[in-house]
């Protein structure tokens, strides 16, 4: 049986933990809302860029572009996006497990990580990431994404990599998120998942009449890298929202269990306290009885003495 | 009285401008263009430059825009850029630092210099200089 001061100490420590988890829950909730706002904005940008690229491809015949044509090589580079911190439920584990599974049978020549959890995951496996971008997972910044994509597209241009893929967590809603992989280079226009209902063709005007200034090829040249930057930025924002959402749920659970535990401990504390009191009373009564008995015995003995 | 048209300026980070305008001007890779209502449908890529918006006749606002694209549709004009900033949002100190950094890189090329890094430095220089120009333009306007 634990003693009272042990339980009291335990309750205190659980209360402190609860305070922390509760605070983290609030913070993640606020951050998630901010990230959701970002997702909305980014979606508009990305889909418009994608629409224009599809338009150009549809209406101006065959245009080949180094970023669209496939290469026979098998050298794959991966970008893995995970969190900056732990304590976010299954978020980090899920995305890293997917990345591991995907990389198993491929010739991975370069590995880029965003978020220190991802970096440490690979360092522990003995694979030093070729480059890691810290703090980007916590505060997605467009110019940093641009710098990163410049490095990667240059590698692609030089032929050091034949494919560029990204593994991140897609935010679906506050209750569900899904780790997923997306091929970035070469660009496959069809496999970018659309959230809007597909098949709605905008027929409001004749799209073959669009004027491309100065030429469709040049517009495409300028647009593809921008679309990629937009996508990667979006992916990071998605990951950020997912991380915070996951953490929010985890912390909510933790707070709830802490409450339960405090209840249980308090009950235990009371029963131990009661038991101690009972024991003390029993002791006192026992002692009193004993002393009474002793007195009675003594007086009996003395009275016998008198008789003699 | 010029005809107004819907204009939307978006960046991946935010909605920069949304509303009607009578004129909008941007710098495309082919040169600077101005768009009025009923323009022919057009798509072009943007260079770094000055975004000029006239919400109605007589008022004129300038802003900074970096690479992106413009889409002119019958139902409105969409401008999507990597970054857009009003003059009051431009961080002049940061732009100046970036300008000096880029100049440094261009004048003292590294050993492993290649054309792409040179081009990037030039774009960075362009960005910084345009930002500063727009900033200084707006400060002289208000005085």
Image (cartoon, coloured by chain):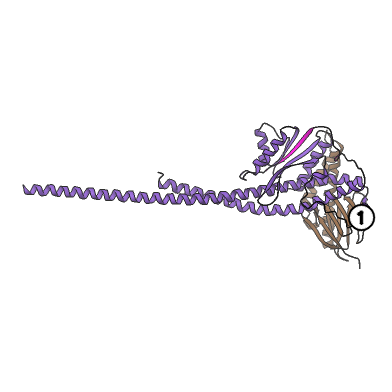
Chain colours: A purple, B brown
Task: State whether residue B91 is above or below residue B56.
Answer: above
Residue shown at 82% from the left, 45% from the top: A190
The x and y percentages for residue A256 are 55, 51
Residue shown at 70% from the left, 46% from the top: A239
The x and y percentages for residue A151 are 79, 39
Asked whether residue A79 is drawn in magenta, I would say yes
Chain for disc number 1: A
Direction from residue A27 to residue A105 in the image, left or right: right
Q: Quadrant of residue A217?
A: top right
The x and y percentages for residue B71 are 87, 54
What is the secondary structure assignment of the residue under circle 1?
A: loop
Task: State whether residue A184 is above or below residue A269.
Answer: above
Asked whether residue A128 is drawn in magenta, I would say no
Instruction: Spot the residue most to the left.
Output: A308
Instruction: Spot the residue most to the bottom.
Output: B1
Mark 1 residue crowding within 10 angstroms, few (<14) / some (14–19) / many (20+)? few
In magenta, the rendered stretch is A66-82
Instruction: Spot the residue most to the front.
Output: A199
Residue B66 shows in this picture = no
How many numbered badges does the structure rendering display? 1
The x and y percentages for residue A138 are 68, 47
Direction from residue A17 to residue B125 in the image, left or right: right
- For the C terminus of chain B, which image quadrant? bottom right
Q: Nearer the viewer, residue B15 or B118?
A: B15
- For the N terminus of chain B, which image quadrant? bottom right
Direction from residue A101 to residue B43 in the image, left or right: right
Task: State whether residue A144 is above or below residue B25.
Answer: above
Residue position marked by numbered label 1 in the rendering = A206
Residue A124 shows in this picture = yes
């Amino acid at each position: 049986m634990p003693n009272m001061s042990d339980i009291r100490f335990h309750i205190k420590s659980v209360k402190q933990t609860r305070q922390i988890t509760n605070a983290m829950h609030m913070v993640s909730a606020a951050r998630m809302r901010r990230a959701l706002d970002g997702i909305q904005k980014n979606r508009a940008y990305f889909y418009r860029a994608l629409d224009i690229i599809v338009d150009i491809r549809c209406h101006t015949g065959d245009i080949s572009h180094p970023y669209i044509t496939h290469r026979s090589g098998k050298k794959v580079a991966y970008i893995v996006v995970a969190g900056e911190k732990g304590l976010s439920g299954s978020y980090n584990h899920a995305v890293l497990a997917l990345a591991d599974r995907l990389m198993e049978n491929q010739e991975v020549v370069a590995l880029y990580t965003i978020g220190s959890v991802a970096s440490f995951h690979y360092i522990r496996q003995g694979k030093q990431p070729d480059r890691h971008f810290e703090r980007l997972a916590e505060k997605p910044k467009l110019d940093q994404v641009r710098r990163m994509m410049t490095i990667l597209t240059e590698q692609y241009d030089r032929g050091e990599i034949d494919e560029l893929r990204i593994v991140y967590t897609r935010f679906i809603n506050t209750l569900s998120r899904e780790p997923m992989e997306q091929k970035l280079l070469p660009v496959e226009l069809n496999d970018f998942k659309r959230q809007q209902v597909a098949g709605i063709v905008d027929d409001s005007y004749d799209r073959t009449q669009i004027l491309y200034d100065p030429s469709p090829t040049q517009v495409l040249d300028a647009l593809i890298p921008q679309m990629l930057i937009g996508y990667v930025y979006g992916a990071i924002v998605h990951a950020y929202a997912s991380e915070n959402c996951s953490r929010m749920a985890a912390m909510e659970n933790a707070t709830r269990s802490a409450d339960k535990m405090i209840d249980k401990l308090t009950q235990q504390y009371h029963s131990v306290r009661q038991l101690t009191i009972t024991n003390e009373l029993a002791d006192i009564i026992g002692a009193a009885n004993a002393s009474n008995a002793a007195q009675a015995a003594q007086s009996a003995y003395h009275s016998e003495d008198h008789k003699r | 009285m010029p005809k107004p048209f819907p204009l939307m300026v978006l960046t991946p980070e935010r909605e920069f401008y949304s509303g009607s305008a009578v004129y909008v001007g941007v710098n495309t890779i082919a040169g600077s263009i101005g768009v009025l209502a009923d323009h022919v449908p057009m798509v072009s890529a943007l260079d770094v430059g000055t975004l000029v918006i006239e919400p109605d006749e007589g008022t004129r606002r300038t802003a900074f825009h970096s690479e992106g694209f413009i889409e002119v549709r019958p139902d409105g004009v969409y401008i999507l850029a990597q970054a857009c900033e009003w003059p009051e949002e431009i961080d002049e100190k940061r732009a100046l630092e970036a300008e000096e950094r880029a100049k440094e890189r261009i004048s003292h090329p590294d050993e492993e210099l290649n054309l792409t890094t040179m081009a990037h430095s030039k774009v960075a220089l362009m960005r910084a200089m345009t930002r500063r120009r727009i900033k200084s333009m707006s400060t002289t306007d208000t005085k």
